[in-house]
């Protein structure tokens, strides 16, 4: 199952349709075409920065005469975007005022949306379950020997 981070828009509106679900995990398109993937998700500054850094690393490798190894330096940027791209999306949403509702686990995005909608409806209606039992309902402690680990007066 995949974990989806649920981000709600600023103002904490009651509309479930306005939320964004971000899959937490590796992104293949972020690895293959990082600047385009970042631009698609409206991360303009990050896209421009990735484009410039990839170009500078490639030119740096050519000037030093590294050949293919110089071009592979730009692969580090691609790998970073592939691994941390979803985290960059979540950070950008937080900077825009969105807040994190929680995490939903599901196999597909549609299933995650349904699970979130059901949990969001369920949380507002019913009170939170009681986790700690009432101490008055607990059984009283029973004195006596427990596996020979207690001291009995008069015995050696």
Image (cartoon, rainbow, N blue to C red):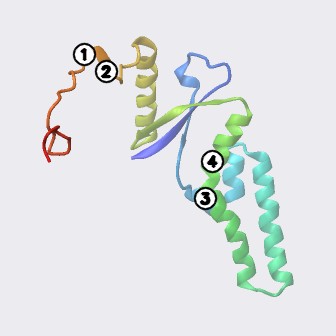
Q: Which mark is on residue 82?
A: 3
Mark in front: 2 vs 4: 2
Q: Earlier in the sequence, mark 3 or mark 4?
A: 3
What residue lies at 79% left-to-right and 72% top-to-bottom? 57
Mark 2 and mark 4: span between their CA atoms? 39 Å
What residue lies at 82% left-to-right and 82% top-to-bottom? 62
Mark in front: 1 vs 3: 1
Nearest to the observer: residue 124 or residue 151:
151
Q: Describe residue 76's horizontal placement relative to residue 116 as left or right.
A: right
Extreme right residue here? 63
Residue annotated with mark 2? 133
Residue annotated with mark 1? 137
Residue annotated with mark 4? 87
Q: Earlier in the sequence, mark 3 or mark 2?
A: 3
- State the image coordinates of residue 52 (x, y, percent, origin top left): 82, 62
Q: Quick one: label 1, few (<14), some, or many (20+) residues within 10 Å?
A: few
Q: Earlier in the sequence, mark 2 or mark 4?
A: 4
- State the image coordinates of residue 15 (x, y, percent, origin top left): 56, 18
């Amino acid at each position: 199952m995949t974990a989806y981070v649920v981000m709600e828009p600023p103002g904490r509106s009651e509309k479930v349709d306005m939320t964004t679900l971000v899959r937490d995990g590796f992104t293949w398109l972020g690895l293959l075409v990082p600047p385009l993937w970042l631009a698609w998700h409206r991360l303009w500054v990050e896209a421009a920065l990735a484009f410039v850094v990839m170009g500078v690393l490639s030119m740096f490798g050519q000037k030093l005469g590294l050949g293919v190894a110089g071009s592979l330096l730009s692969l580090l940027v691609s790998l970073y975007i592939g691994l941390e791209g979803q985290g960059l999306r979540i950070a950008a949403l937080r900077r825009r005022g969105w807040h994190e509702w929680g995490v939903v686990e599901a196999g597909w995005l549609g299933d995650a949306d349904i699970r979130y909608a059901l949990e969001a409806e369920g949380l507002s209606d019913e009170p939170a379950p009681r986790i700690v039992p009432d101490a008055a309902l607990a059984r009283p402690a029973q004195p006596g020997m427990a596996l020979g680990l207690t001291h009995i007066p008069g015995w050696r």
